[in-house]
Amino acid sequence: MVPEMKKSYEDYWTYEMCLDLVEKFHKKAHQERYEVVKALMACKLKKGDSVCTYVQIMQRYMQYLEKPNVSFDKELAIDMVLNSLPPSYDQFILNYHLNKIETTLTQIHNLLQPA
């Protein structure tokens, strides 16, 4: 433990110290998770941006959220990516749903890459 932190806990019982640390770090983790979810939900592919880079960014957000045990069903992750695409991808989305493609987010990323 860092000396400054150790000094601040010298009058605590072990149990009290653990409770205090959990409370402090849980709040921080909750705030970070909120910020990532906020950024993820605000993602929209802008005209002229690379769809490949965009999907990679969304994948990173989802991977970050998996670290603190926020699980994403693969279909939910795909739906979030498809929902964030601009109208110019409507035909791709329609084909995806009509063909009921069983795929992963990585495969969606590959399908969206320009030929």
Image (cartoon, rainbow, N blue to C red):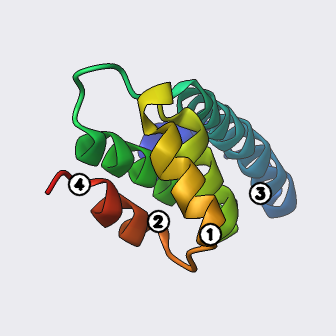
The kind of residue on which mark 1 rests is Lys
Residue 18 — which label? 3
Q: Position of residue 4 (x, y in %)?
A: 48, 37
Of the two numbered discs 3 and 4 in the rendering, the one whose residue sits closer to the viewer: 4
Task: Work out whether residue 25 can be spotted.
Answer: yes
> Circle 4 is placed at which residue position?
113
- Circles 1 and 2, Cβ within 8 Å, touching? The answer is yes
Query: What residue lies at 64% left-to-right and 61% top-to-bottom?
Result: 97
Mark 1 neighbour density, 10 Å: few (under 14) some (14–19) many (20 or more):
few
Give the quadrant of the C terminus: bottom left
Query: What residue lies at 61% left-to-right and 46% top-to-bottom?
Result: 80
Whichever of callouts 4 and 2 sits on the residue coming sooner in the sequence is: 2
The kind of residue on which mark 2 rests is Leu
Q: Nearer the viewer, residue 11 or 65?
A: 65
Of the two numbered discs 4 and 1 in the rendering, the one whose residue sits closer to the viewer: 4
Tell me how far mark 3 sits from mark 1, CA to CA: 35 Å
Tell me how far mark 3 sits from mark 4, CA to CA: 49 Å
> Circle 2 is placed at which residue position?
105
Number of labels in the image equals 4
- Circles 3 and 2, Cβ within 8 Å, touching? The answer is no
Tell me how far mark 3 sits from mark 2, CA to CA: 39 Å
The kind of residue on which mark 4 rests is Gln
**Would residue 70 appear left or right of 7 to someone viewing this image?**
right
Whichever of callouts 1 and 2 sits on the residue coming sooner in the sequence is: 1
Looking at the image, residue 43 lies above or below residue 64:
above
Of the two numbered discs 3 and 2 in the rendering, the one whose residue sits closer to the viewer: 2
> Circle 1 is placed at which residue position?
74
- Circles 3 and 4, Cβ within 8 Å, touching? The answer is no
Tell me how far mark 4 sits from mark 1, CA to CA: 19 Å
Q: Position of residue 81 (x, y in %)?
A: 53, 46
